[in-house]
Amino acid sequence: MSEYFATVEWKRGSQLFLDKKYSRAHEWQFEGGVVVPASSSPHIVPLPMSVAENVDPEEAFVASISSCHMLFFLDFASRKKLIVEQYTDKAIGTLAIGPNGKQMMTEVVLRPTVTFVGERPSSEVLKALHHQSHEACFIANSVLTEVRVDETFCV
């Protein structure tokens, strides 16, 4: 068993609070010392109460699934002696009403583009690597959201 820690901190400062016009800007602090400026999504809480430049929880959710998948993909590719030069995923998460009637991330679509050194593996090998990565991803295994790889990127 492993444990992971994050500190999320928001401060009111001199802002009013009960008028609901307070800033949603806050920080995520991680064990290694990285501090990430965060906020609610401007799609949910309008500007200027949100900070568009900061990372919002929905974006972080999508990024964590994409990152987990990529890390497993890189590991499995290296085991097959495939040299990955670059991996770029322009993942998309959809926030919608779920089957329980509540808003949720209903789907995350991974759209990875992978560049290899030497000959590119077949689309069948790529699909197998992505399937294996999806099955191994801790984050994808932890959520109710449908997570899938857009197979048009496996060509």
Image: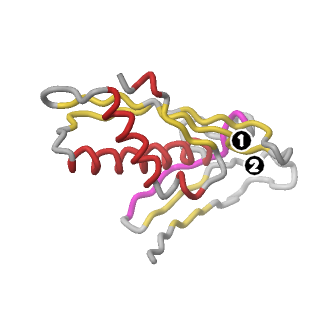
Relative depth, front residue between 151 and 96: 151
Q: Give the magenta range.
A: 33-43
Marks 2 and 1 in Cβ contact (< 8 Å)? yes
Relative depth, front residue between 135 and 24: 135
For image coordinates 21% across by 45% down, the residue present is 80
Q: Is residue 94 above or below residue 40?
A: above
Task: Give the labeled residue for mark 1.
Answer: 49
Q: Position of residue 153 (x, y in %)?
A: 41, 24
Task: Give the labeled residue for mark 2.
Answer: 22
Question: Farthest bottom residue?
Answer: 1
Q: Is residue 104 above or below residue 136?
A: above
Please state which amino acid type lies under the numbered disc 1: Met
**Which tag, 2 or 1, sits closer to the chain's start?**
2
Relative depth, front residue between 87 and 153: 153
Q: Position of residue 79 (x, y in %)?
A: 21, 50
Q: Is residue 45 above or below residue 100?
A: above
Q: CA distance from mark 2 to mark 1?
A: 6 Å
Magenta region includes residue 82: no
Q: Quadrant of the C terminus?
A: top left
Q: Position of residue 139 (x, y in %)?
A: 52, 55
Q: Position of residue 56 (x, y in %)?
A: 60, 44
Q: Quadrant of the N terminus?
A: bottom left
For image coordinates 15% across by 31% down, the residue present is 117
Please state which amino acid type lies under the numbered disc 2: Tyr
Secondary structure that dominates the magenta span: loop
Question: Farthest left residue?
Answer: 118
- The kind of secondary structure element at disc 1 is loop
